[in-house]
Amino acid sequence: MAKVYITGFGIVSSLGIGVEKNLQSLKEFKSGVSTPTYLKTQHKELPVGELKFSNEMLREKLGITDPYISRTTLLALLAATEAQQMAGLTEANLADAALISGTSVGGMDISELAYGAVLNNEELDYRSSFQNHDCGASTEMVAGHLKIKGHTETISTACSSSANSIMNAGRLIKAGMADFVIAGGTDALSVFTLNGFGALKILDPNHCKPFDSTRQGLNLGEGAAYLVLESEASVKARGAKAYGELIGYGNANDAYHQTASSPDGTGAFMAMQKALNVAGKTAADIDYINAHGTGTQNNDLSESKAIKQIFNEDVPVYSSTKAYTGHTLGAAGAIEAVFSILSIQEQKVFPNLNVKQPMDVLPEPVTEMQPVKIQNVLSNSFGFGGNCTSLIFSAAS
């Protein structure tokens, strides 16, 4: 079976813009979670993973003047451009490339800016105000910005969106339908999501504590990340540098609840088992798990039970990195895919922050930076609606 290599990646999160900024913060155990500066919310006391750049500053970095482009799109443009540049894709390469992008709420942030005018019956240019609302708008703009002419696809499966983008990219390449796929996802903070998760009563009023027995919920975040996935034949032909390999992927749905995982982790177990089967690996081959680990009571217990079912008494080292970035929803799978590849490159596990009283289902997560021999990383992303996806990345061979 042809291999699928990762030849570039880019990232924007509350840790900063670019791979180096994010890696530096991970190494220094520096969280990007803080109170909101730019999000126009009444709940200024709630911690979030917000990139400390205004929309105006982001537009200036990109050389864009249109004020109606959503923050979701601006984040995507920065991350996708970094991935393209790292991979060294030329205009000719991009003309044949595919783009698969995931997002949960698309351009909700830009629509909210017009919401007050609608409520007050003020005169409004509706076309300009809402044309970038739908989930596909950011995908189209990234494709246009990078001059991608191949297959374009938008996936919105809540918090597994960008993990599913990466999975579909691997499938496209293995099917011989593309040599290059830029895949990932993006989501900006919005009042809609903050209030929605607040209504579900799963926001931690303090910094989140994934896998801690006293956890109270998650912190929302924003960001974007994209990977360049490339066929083995193309990597050889271009002499491209491979930073890792996508060897396994699995998606399942536990069909339990619209916003809760099944208590016994059925969907998570099935996704992880499928990913191992596709990779041709056993549980013993996994060296590190980058867990979904949101910090909610439901997710962390469900995921822990599923991990226990897969690995029995031989659970590899694991951690959640969401205490660094907040939960970035549709972007989370791709952001944590980048962190997984960085773990392989650095041969380090980035610690699970804020754990004081570990849960008792699994051994304690990694809470201090430690060198570990890492060949294979399992990365989990689980979304509302029971949509569960697991990816397995390996050192390039």
Image (cartoon, rainbow, N blue to C red):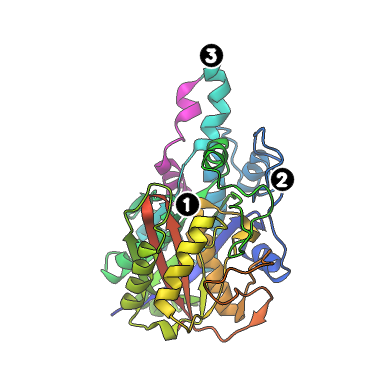
Q: Contact, CB < 8 Å: mark 1 with mark 3? A: no
Q: Which residues are magenta?
A: 125-147
In percent of the image, x 57 and y 36: which residue is there? 191
SS under mark 3 = loop
Q: Quadrant of residue 307?
A: bottom left
Q: Amino acid at mark 1?
A: Gly
Q: Which residue is mark 2?
A: 35
- Point out residue 326 in the picture as x, y percentages from the top left corner: 61, 54
**Mark 3 belongs to which amino acid?**
Glu
Residue hosting label 3? 123
Residue 230 on image: x %, y %: 40, 70
Residue that label 1 marks: 330
Quadrant where the N terminus sits is: bottom left
Image disc number at residue 295? none
Q: Distance of mark 2 from mark 1, alpha carbons? A: 21 Å
Crowding at mark 2 (Cα within 10 Å: few <14, some 14-19, many 20+): some
